[in-house]
Amino acid sequence: MDDAGWTGRFIRHLEFERRLSPLTCANYRRDLEALAAYLAQQDVADWAQVDGEHIRAFSAACFRKGLSARSIQRRLSAARTFYRYLIREKEVGKNPIASVSAPKAKKRLPGNLDADRMAHLLNIPGEGALVDRDRSMLELLYSSGLRLAELVSLDLDDIDAQDATVRVTGKGSKERVVPVGRHALAALRRWRSTRGDLANAGEKALFVSNRGKRISPRAVQARVKHWAKRQGIDTNVYPHLFRHSFATHVLESSHDLRGVQELLGHANIATTQVYTHLDFQHLAQIYDQTHPRARRKDK
C-alpha cells in the first residue's frame, strides 16, 4: 500500500488533533496495518481503489484466522474512521466501509465484585510506603470509578482533599470532577505521608513505582492481581473490574443512570446502559428467591 504515508499522517492526526491516548493510537495503527497487509496481498496499490467487496473479503479472512467478532468490529471501525479522514483530506471520494456490516458479537456483561467481596479485597493488611500506595490506588479505583489510564496519569494536585474530589482527564482529553469517598481519602492521606520514601525529588505523579517515577499501567495490573490473590479472591481481578463494580453498586443504590454516566465520563448514555442489565439480573435473582409465585416447590 502507500508505504504507510497516509496511515502515518492519520495516526499523527489522532495523536495531536484528537489527542487520543498512545494505547488507542497503537491499536488503530495495528488494525490498519493488518488491513494494508491484506490489500497488498490482493494487489491493491492505493486506498482509493478499495471497495466494499475488498472490505467484506478482509472481514471474512479475519474470521477464518480465528479472530472474534469483537476484534473484527474493531478493525472495521478503525478502517471506517481512517476513511473519514481520507475523505476530509480529499485523498478518496467515498468510504468503502459504509456499506459493510460488521459481524455481530455476543453481548458480554461486565464482571463485578459484590460489595462484601470488594470490602474484603480493599481491607489490605500491612504498613509501609508500598502498602500505603497500593491501598490508596485500589481504594481510589473503586471509590471514583476511574479507568486505569486515568489513575496512572493523576498528579498530586488533582486530588482536592478539602472538597473530597479528584480531577480526572478521561478519553479525548475530557476533564471531569469525581467525588472521592472517605475510605479512599484516608488511604490517600496515609500514602501522602509515606510517598516521599519512594518518589524522586520533584516528581509530580500521585502514584510512583519503587523507582520513584510515575507508576505504569502494567505495574498497577500486577499489584491488583497480587492483592486479589493475597486476599483470597477466587475470580479474575483487574483494574477495570473496580470501575464495573463502582458503576453497578451506585446504580443498584440510586437507579440514576444519568448520574452514573456523568461519574464514569461516558459520552454516550448507551455505553452506561449495559449496567442496567446487571441491575436487572440482580433484581431478577432476588425475585426468584423471594416471590411466592416464583419459588419452586421442593419435590
Image (spheres, rainbow, N blue to C red):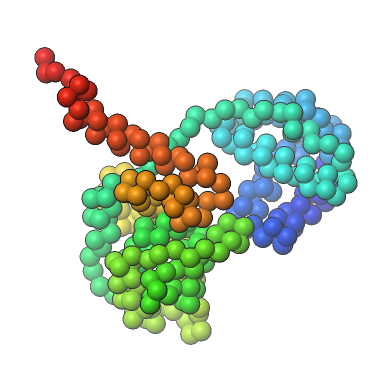
The answer to which image quadrant residue 163 occupies is bottom left
Q: Position of residue 172 (x, y in %)?
A: 62, 57
Compared with 184, 288 (above or below) is above
Compared with 43, 233 (above or below) is below
The answer to which image quadrant residue 80 occupies is top right
Q: Residue at x 40, y 64 (%)?
A: 179
Q: Position of residue 193 (x, y in %)?
A: 33, 81
- Quadrant containing the N terminus is top right
Outermost residue, left side = 299
Outermost residue, bottom side = 201
Q: Residue at x 14, y 18 (%)?
A: 297
Front in this rendered view, residue 259 or 82: 259
Front in this rendered view, residue 210 or 84: 84
Q: Residue at x 78, y 47 (%)?
A: 85
* Residue 148 appears left or right of 188: right
Q: Position of residue 14 (x, y in %)?
A: 70, 55
Q: Residue at x 23, y 28 (%)?
A: 288
Residue 232 visible: no
Outermost residue, top side = 299
Residue 280 visible: yes
Front in this rendered view, residue 211 or 70: 70
- Quadrant containing the C terminus is top left
Q: Position of residue 79 (x, y in %)?
A: 72, 40
Compared with 37, 251 (above or below) is below
* Residue 120 appears left or right of 238: left
